[in-house]
Image (tube, helix red, strand yellow):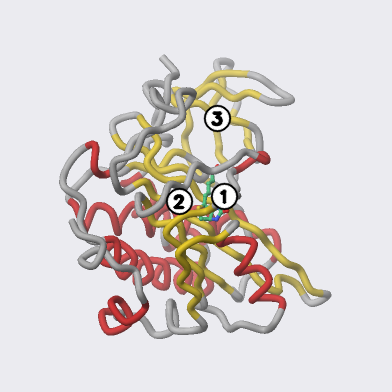
């Protein structure tokens, strides 16, 4: 696909938007950024409205979870951050990660037919390898949540991954000729607006069934590492986004943070 056909210029996707507000605030579309999350946080602090976004062709300091660098080569992904100012309680903030994961899984599936699955809490995987990562950055005000920046890094094109990622990462181009990125963007924004609106109105219960259908974690054997280490079967998500795991003594344990490996996914056998 030529650069022109895969342009992310706002003029190519704004007319395709089906949303009420998502993608319709301020839009910063850049050739190169340090990190779209960092730039959008600055826009949030300057008063940008919900639905604003920042996206770019390449990031020089893309941020991953746990202080890691996010590999963001030019033209090979959807390096995108979206600004939310959701009407939810601070303790519900982790649920926004699940909303974004569900929205991106739906967008990938609707656009490509590929069976992207959600690895709790914030990865999308395809045939056991990571396709997309999600990084939330939250700003609080005295009254509660001021803003949430939802950053998504979706691998779309062909690129050489760093050696340490090669066996764990995948991209849409590893499976098919990728669609123009604006199609993924427009579907993601529509799905994100829907999942966030449902969360605001009815809580996670309104999304649980759709989430379960796209999850590769629920119903699977998982290994929990961190302060406590155990294995068990992931049974459910609770109302604040915690994972409920039945351990080998049949006790149901709630996992909030920490690393969860899912059998058969990203190298865990
Ligand atoms: C992870 O570690 O899995 C999360 C990766 C999130 C990467 C995206 S790319 C767009 C946005 N800007 C960043 O600096 N990070 C997120």
Residue 247 position by quadrant: top right
Disc 3 crowd rating (10 Å Cα; few below 14, some 14-19, many 20+) is many
- Residue at x-position 43% and y-position 77%: 23
The answer to whether the residues at label 2 and label 1 have Cβ atoms under 8 Å apart is yes
Relative vertical location of residue 199 with respect to residue 215 in this rendering, above or below = below
Number of the label disc, if any, that sits on residue 153 = 2
Residue 138 position by quadrant: bottom right
- Residue at x-position 70% and y-position 81%: 46
Q: Is residue 264 left or right of residue 254?
A: left
Label 2 within 8 A of ligand 1 by Cβ: yes
Label 2 – label 1 distance at C-alpha: 9 Å
Label 1 within 8 A of ligand 1 by Cβ: yes
Closest to the observer, 23 or 76: 76
- Residue at x-position 42% and y-position 54%: 208
Number of the label disc, if any, that sits on residue 62 = 1
Quadrant in which the N terminus is drawn: bottom left
User: Which residue is label 3 attached to?
Assistant: 260
Closest to the observer, 121 or 254: 121
């Amino acid at each position: 696909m030529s650069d022109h056909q895969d342009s992310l210029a706002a003029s190519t996707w704004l007319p395709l938007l089906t949303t009420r507000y998502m993608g319709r605030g301020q839009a910063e579309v850049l050739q190169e950024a340090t990190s779209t999350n960092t730039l959008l946080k600055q826009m949030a602090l300057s008063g940008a409205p919900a639905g604003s976004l920042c996206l770019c062709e390449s990031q020089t300091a893309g941020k991953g979870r746990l202080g890691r660098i996010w590999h963001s080569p030019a033209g090979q992904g959807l390096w995108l951050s979206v600004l939310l100012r959701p009407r939810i309680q601070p303790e519900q903030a982790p649920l926004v990660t699940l909303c974004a994961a569900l929205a991106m899984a739906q967008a990938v599936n609707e656009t490509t037919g590929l069976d992207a699955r959600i690895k709790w809490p914030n990865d999308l995987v395809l045939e056991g390898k990571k396709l997309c990562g999600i990084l939330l950055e939250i700003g609080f005000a005295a009254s509660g949540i001021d803003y949430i920046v939802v950053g998504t890094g979706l691998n779309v094109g062909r690129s050489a991954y760093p050696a340490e990622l090669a066996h764990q990462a995948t991209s849409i181009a590893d499976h098919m000729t990728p669609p123009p990125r604006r199609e993924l963007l427009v579907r993601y924004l529509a799905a994100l607006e829907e999942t966030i609106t449902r969360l605001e109105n009815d809580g996670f219960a309104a999304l649980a069934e759709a989430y379960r259908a796209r999850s590769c974690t629920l119903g699977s054997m998982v290994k929990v590492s961190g302060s406590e280490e155990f294995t068990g079967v992931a049974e459910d998500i609770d109302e604040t986004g915690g994972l409920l795991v039945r351990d080998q003594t049949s006790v149901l344990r709630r996992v909030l943070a920490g690393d969860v490996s899912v059998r058969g996914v990203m190298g865990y056998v």
